[in-house]
Amino acid sequence: MGKKIGAVTIGQSPRTDVVPEILQLMGNIELVEGGALDGLTYEEITALAPTAGDYVLVTRLSDGRAVKIAEKYILERLQAQIDRLVKEGAAGIVMLCSGEFPAFSCPKPLLYPQLLLTNFIQAVAGGKKLGIITPDADQVPQVTKRWAAAGVAAVQARPASPYAAEAKIWQAADALKDWGAELIVMDCIGFNQSMRNEVTRITGVPAVLPRTVAARAVAELFA
């Protein structure tokens, strides 16, 4: 195997819905996983639900269920997973989430999909109308604010979860097409390449995935 890279999810590991697909893009890389919600019961996880003013995250549990949590409750648990994976020999860490995070302590390269994605979009989408698909309606204000600062002409966000009925994703794509989106960001690590391909077909414009942007960055650095 190639270099060992840590993959940290805000949910539970293993992320069987993400890791097999991104490994195909990473080349000679060994991914070792850790999750902020590993070891917690469903009842303990539901106690982490966001309230007014919280930064909202949506993620997947190991049994496939989706949950909504407040970022503030998992920051220490994310740091603990980063520390563990580095101690076990990871040459770098990639976060399996496209949300915004404070700077974690890490002596190795730490890749945030949100930063990679933001800089990529700024490079290719200047002056364009940017459509966003985000998992939950509670996330619409925070992602609209974030992407409006990316140098685009206008932003519209529509909620549709990668962990629920795919028909909602196609409906969101239709709405963004009607609005006139010139580029789509599917703003969750849970969206896969098959979903991206269908959104591109519906809208007639490119759609970008956090997971593939992050995977290609890992390959560039470590493969």
Image (cartoon, rainbow, N blue to C red):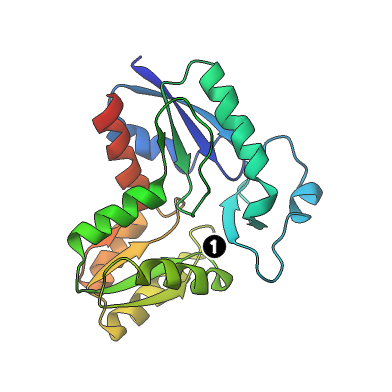
Q: What residue is drawn where x is 58% and y is 26%?
A: 83
- Left or right? Give the position of 149 relative to 32: left
Quadrant occupied by the C terminus: top left
Quadrant housing residue 184: bottom left
Quadrant housing residue 130: bottom left
Residue 53 at least partly seen: yes
Crowding around mark 1 (Cα neighbors within 10 Å: few <14, some 14 to 19, many 20+) is: few
Q: Nearer the viewer, residue 44 or 75?
A: 75
What percent of the width, then of the height, locates residue 62?
Answer: 62, 41
Quadrant occupied by the N terminus: top left
Q: Which residue lies furthest to the bottom in this view?
A: 178
- Left or right? Give the position of 93 relative to 177: right
What percent of the width, then of the height, locates residue 120?
Answer: 25, 54
Residue hosting label 1:
164
Q: What residue is drawn where x is 33% and y is 48%?
A: 116
Residue 193 at least partly seen: no
Q: What residue is drawn where x is 35% and y is 23%?
A: 29
Q: What residue is drawn where x is 27% and y is 69%?
A: 151
Q: Nearer the viewer, residue 183 or 198?
A: 183
What percent of the width, then of the height, locates residue 138?
Answer: 58, 71
Above or below — where is 156 with respect to 210? below
Above or below — where is 219 with respect to 195? above
Element marked by disc 1: loop
Amino acid found under the numbered disc labelled 1: Ala
- Left or right? Give the position of 179 relative to 99: left
What percent of the width, then of the height, locates residue 87?
Answer: 55, 17
Number of callouts in the render? 1
